[in-house]
Amino acid sequence: MEKPLCWTIDDEGPDYSVEEADLKAAYPDCDIRYSGIPFQQDLEDFGAQADVVFAQVSADVTADVISKLKNCKGIAVFGSGYNNVDVQAAKAAGIPVTNVNGYCTEDIADYVLAAMFHFYKPIEALYGQLKNGAWGVTALSQPVHRLSRQTLLLMGFGYIGKVTAQRAHALGMTVLAYDPFVTDEAAREFGAEKVDLDEGLARADFVSVHVRLMPETTGLVDLDLMRKMKPSAVLVNTARGNLVDEDALYDALKANRICGAGLDVFAQEPLPNTSKLLELDNLVLSPHFSSQTVESLWNTYKMAIDIADDFFQGRDCPHILNPEYKDAL
């Protein structure tokens, strides 16, 4: 392919040197362009001519955007979530859509453990207690159980759920898996017991969400679901913010219906400084950071290069989200 145009839409990436070097090695005449968000002007100026589009998960690749992509051979999302890409519009336009699935599996699993440890061994809070003169058992507001005596429910048992299960199992935790698409045997292979949702919620000390965001899962974690959790339980969400009804979560935490929460994702991102979640002391919040490591960024870029090469060469690549796109060609 002569001088392919590769367009990256990303308001987060600090450095594209690896991606650029590899693309140039394979395609010396490749024209590489970058846009932040919003990107509408760049779409008009050059993006409409792109052969391949890489989009950060926060980029809205709408049906209108897709209708203007005249040469596009594929759209790849820089991440697992693709809810901001109109996959059906891409299918109608004959454009395959894929994602870099699995690039940060270990990193998110580690974040879930970190969130659990935050409530089990709250070192930062204990440091504050020490400075205020507390010592020994007086520094704890309530007694805690060992993690090896506690139970983790994984809502969703895909790549991340499985690795999280292995890590939690290694700590001696009882691990439960709720996923209608996973067999009992598959759950046991990763140290988990498959359960229905109500049973899992009733038994769990920690509930970690690993469900794909779709219309039918939006607001899945609502007040009714939280009422089925133990009052001592902690909710962890590293998946997508809109899976959790944040108003219901605020009410549940305010009323101590559940003990706490750890959130790395939010319905509106970045989280506004006016969010009432910031008023609460029984939760820990982070800026959509759970996937971020040197290794995950490296994986993202290397996987993106492989995807670009597949698109340029007209090959099918892994994780095509709309395989029916060929029907429109």
Image: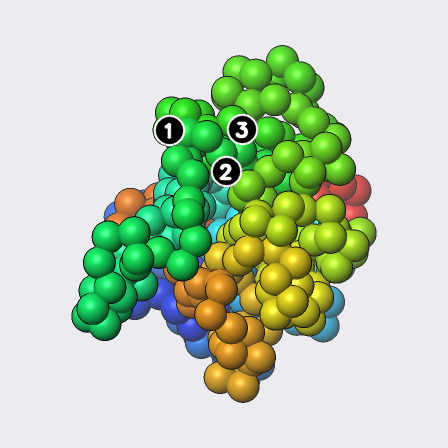
Q: Secondary structure at mark 1?
A: loop
Name of the residue lying farthest toward the front? 138
Position in image of residue 156 (x %, y %): 63, 38
Identify the element where label 3 is drawn. Answer: strand
Residue position marked by numbered label 3 in the rendering:
175
**In the rendered picture of this protein, how many numbered marks are placed on residues?**
3
Image colouring:
rainbow
The residue nearer to you, when weighing 210 against 152, is 152
User: Is residue 56 in view from this perspective?
Assistant: no
Left or right: residue 3 versus residue 248 is left
Q: Is residue 171 above or below residue 46?
A: above
Residue at position x 42%, y 44% from top? Answer: 144
Q: Are marks 1 and 2 in contact (CB under 8 Å)?
A: no
- Gap between marks 1 and 2 measured at Cα: 17 Å
Residue type pointed to by label 1: Leu
Is tag 1's residue or tag 2's residue first in the polypeptide sequence? 2
Q: Which residue is mark 1?
A: 171
On the picture, is 114 further left or further right than 250?
left
* 1 vs 2, front mark: 1
* Rendering coords of residue 284 (x, y %): 44, 63
Residue 170 visible in image: yes
Q: Residue at x 64, y 46 (%)?
A: 230
Location of residue 282 with respect to 64 vertically, above or below = above
The image shows residue 46, relative to residue 287, as above or below, that is below
Residue 187's image quarter? top right
Q: Residue 281 has which mark? A: none
Please name the residue that numbered disc 2 is placed on: 160
Amino acid type, mark 2: Ile
Could you say which is closer to the camera, residue 326 or residue 104?
A: 104
